[in-house]
Image (cartoon, grey):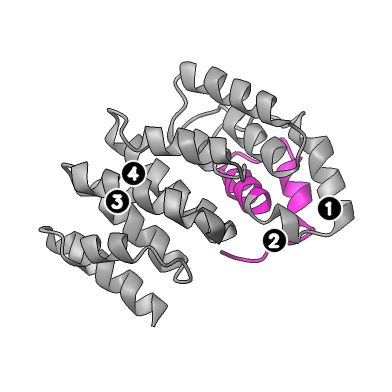
Amino acid sequence: MPEPAVSDLAVVDDPRDARGIRHDIVWLLAHRFDELPGFVQNCLRGIASDLRAAPAFNGTSDTECLRFALEVASGQLDGAQIVARFQTLRQQGHGTELCHAFALWDSDQAVTYLSVLCTDTSTALRATSAYALVRLLARDPAREPVIAAALSTATSHEPGCLLPLRLGDALAEHPEVELSAVRHRLATHPSAKVRAAGAKQHNASD
């Protein structure tokens, strides 16, 4: 993931962006929020609640999940507010980006909700939830026993390949994450594509 720059703030608050650039920058800043200088964090707190819509964010003009991500990362919402916002956005039909935003909250509740979403009827949502759990674990290794159990269950019951493929991507991005049982499942998966993803994440950890 690239390093955030202070100049990115101008793009975040620029209503002229119609190419989805701001979409990527918002996610970058949210995921790296703790590494940003204090004055940049304060600017983002002001922008988060007033984030303007742009015409092209992965095919949608909605920015609710982007705003939610910034508000979670910047600590503007308490636990009850995060859960309430998550439930509202979920009821409105938000899925994969909502999982990424929710995973910015380092809490037992986030792990529980994402673990449940790993069993959702939506293949994309299951895969994204698994990916998000790995990213959450990378920030808080103490949660490994719970997350490892959730991901082991998810991979053992997953009928398709998207979830294990996304897990392979996440583990390649975060080679410091152990999850040895999950890595073994990927390496011995019936799908050659999944095994290749397992090899990729194994090489990244070498």
Type of amino acid at the residue the image marks with label 2: Pro
- In the image, the segment drawn in magenta is 1-30
Residue 29 bears which disc, if any?
none
Give the spatial CA distance, label 2 vs label 3: 33 Å
Residue under the image location 73 percent in, 31 percent down: 78
Of the image marks 4 and 1, the number of the one nearer the N terminus? 1
User: Is 185 placed above or below 80 here?
Assistant: below
In the image, is 135 to the left or to the right of 16?
Answer: left
Q: Nearer the viewer, mark 2 or mark 3?
A: 3
Q: Which amino acid does label 4 sit on?
A: Ala
Q: Do the numbered discs 2 and 4 sit on residues whose CB atoms are within 8 Å? A: no
Q: Earlier in the sequence, mark 3 or mark 1?
A: 1
Q: Is residue 196 left or right of residue 23?
A: left
Q: Is residue 97 left or right of residue 190?
A: right
Q: Marks 2 and 1, how far apart in space?
A: 10 Å
Q: Earlier in the sequence, mark 2 or mark 3?
A: 2
C-alpha separation, residue under disc 3 versus residue under disc 1: 39 Å
In front: label 4 or label 1: 4
Element type where label 1 sits in the image? helix
Circle 4 Cα neighbour tier, 10 Å, few/some/many (<14 / 14–19 / ≥20): many
Q: Can residue 58 be seen in this view?
A: no
Q: Residue 40 carries which label?
A: 1
**Which quadrant: the C terminus?**
bottom left
Q: Earlier in the sequence, mark 2 or mark 1?
A: 2
